[in-house]
Amino acid sequence: MGITVSELVAEYWSVQEVSVNLIIFANLFGALLLGLVVGYERAYHGRAAGMRTYGLVCLASCALVVVAGYPTFWYGGGALGSGVSHVSADPTRVIQGVVTGIGFLGAGVILKEGMNISGLTTAASIWSSSVIGVLVGVGFYASAILLAVLSAGLMMWASRLEQWLPSRPAVAVQLHFCVGVLPSKAVLVQFALEQGYEIASGTLQIHCVNDREEWRFVASAITRKQGATLSVLSHALRQLEGIDEYSLGYARN
């Protein structure tokens, strides 16, 4: 006599199955917290990949690794085979192919424009959603639901957490000087300090066309409260001699 649906469901949610899911839950929460810690360091310095991106990647990576540790429970193995794996092929190769393919898809949504990079969190969320699909595919439904809830919550509320925590906003600056003017970096450094900013090391780019120089750099606020707003910076730049045109915008680099 075959096993009934109710018996199959009861066996699937056995003590062993629930214990495995609880272990996965603990791993996911631990990975999320550690990913947020690392991401906050990047967010504090105004980088594009902040708490949401690092949290999603760390969370999804943990899910992929931890699911590989319980192959006997894949595809309802605990209920159908008394804890004995009935997997005939190697699903890890399929998982590897899926994750690699989704990686190329995620790369397509990342855009770089000047000093700004956008789409990193979207790319990470696409990759995370592929891992959710993997968990559902191998039968870890509870873990898949938790990963989906954590991922969605991370994307909705991590940005608010970043705003609440201390950080150093960054501004992308593009200056066009008048013909024949030789700008001084020391003057710009002093100007930035007066406005509550410092020029980020390694970001200065200098272009010269027809004896007219163009400087591009990222200025990081010393603290969030000290950094002047874009409107204040704009009015201050108008007072500097030798500047013909300028462009300002908050940078995520």
Image: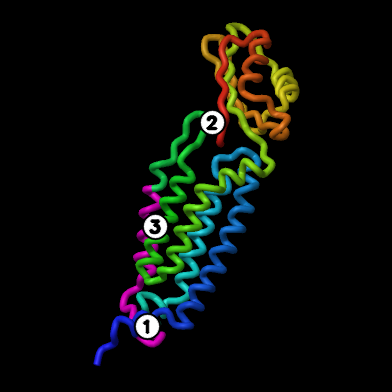
Circle 1 SS class: helix
Query: In which quadrant will I find the N terminus?
Result: bottom left
Q: Which residues are magenta?
A: 81-105
On the image, which quarter does residue 148 sit in?
Answer: bottom left
Query: Mark 1 belongs to which amino acid?
Result: Ala
Q: Is residue 7 above or below residue 184?
A: below
Query: In which quadrant will I find the C terminus?
Result: top right
Q: Residues within 10 Å of mark 1 (few under 14, many from 20)?
A: many
Residue 34 percent across, percent down from the top left: 61, 58
The residue drawn where x is 61% and y is 6% is: 180
The residue drawn where x is 44% and y is 69% is: 142
User: Closer to the observer: label 3 or label 1?
Assistant: 1
Q: Is residue 71 above or below residue 27?
A: below
Circle 2 SS class: loop
Task: List the residue tagged with mark 2.
Answer: 115
The residue drawn where x is 59% and y is 63% is: 30
Query: Mark 2 belongs to which amino acid?
Result: Met
Task: List the residue tagged with mark 3.
Answer: 130
Q: Is residue 211 above or below residue 202?
A: above
Circle 3 SS class: helix
